[in-house]
Amino acid sequence: MINGRTSDAGSTVETGSTGSTGESATTDGSSDGHRGVDESAVGAHSISIDQIFEILKNQRRRSVLRYMQTAGEEVRLGELAEQIAAWECDKEVSEITSSERKRVYVGLYQCHLPKMDDVDAIAYNKPRGKIAPGDNSETFEHYLPDDDAESEARWSQYHTYISVLSVLAIGSLALLAAVGSTPPAVVGTAAVLGVLSGLPLLPVVESVRS
């Protein structure tokens, strides 16, 4: 796996290493459901902010991290799929159907687990169908909300903020262009790109404030 990737913005987070021995990470929860960054966890690995929130924006991948955080050791893909299917269907594990289990199993196997393995959120042994905590699992846990419904609401709120800011920026630039203050095309493009590039940083700001 590749460590130390950077995003276009160049923002990276130094991370600790949990290895693949199955040791569970220790984190401190915060009052609003987000975890602050524990400086004692800083180590040799680095990962970009964009990579962190690319993983955390998907509910099923957050469920994988929660299950692994609780298990703290290597688990089988079958049992992971069963538990996530039960959570998604609001059922007990014993009540889920084979089709419900298969739907989650296939999604994890083909898409989510390889994506998480690429950034060391987990250590995925695909041939054996086993998953263990990854070198960067502790960092992902720091940013993992305690409540998934709250997480979905926050992402929706962030996107609303961006939409409003974009409208205000474009309106202001149109006004400036009307009075001949600034070339509209240049400033307009810069403003929109600036707003969009700030999107990945909004959850980070929220986490730091908490």
Image: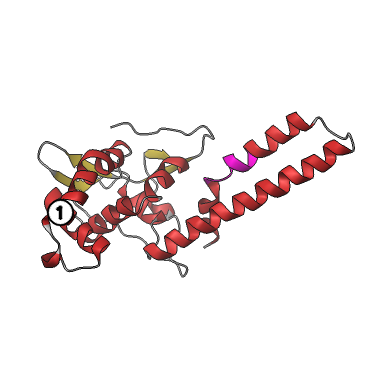
The residue lying at 21 percent from left, 56 percent from top is 72
Q: Amino acid at mark 1?
A: Ser
In magenta, the rendered stretch is: 194-200
Residue 92 lies in quadrant: bottom left
* Residue 196 is one of the magenta-drawn residues: yes
Q: Is residue 101 left or right of residue 32?
A: left
* Residue 190, x across and y down, in percent: 69, 34
Asked if residue 163 can be seen in this view, the reply is yes
| x then y, percent, for residue 9 | 54, 35
Q: Nearer the viewer, residue 36 or 147?
A: 147
Element at label 1: helix
Name the residue at 15% across, 53% down: 99
Disc 1 designates what residue? 99
Quadrant hosting residue 130? top left
| Residue at 55% from the left image edge and 46% from the top image edge | 199
Residue 34 visible in rendering: no
Residue drawn at 12 percent across, 51 percent down: 78
**Numbered disc total:** 1
Location of residue 76 in the rendering, given as x and y in whole percent from the top left corner? 12, 50
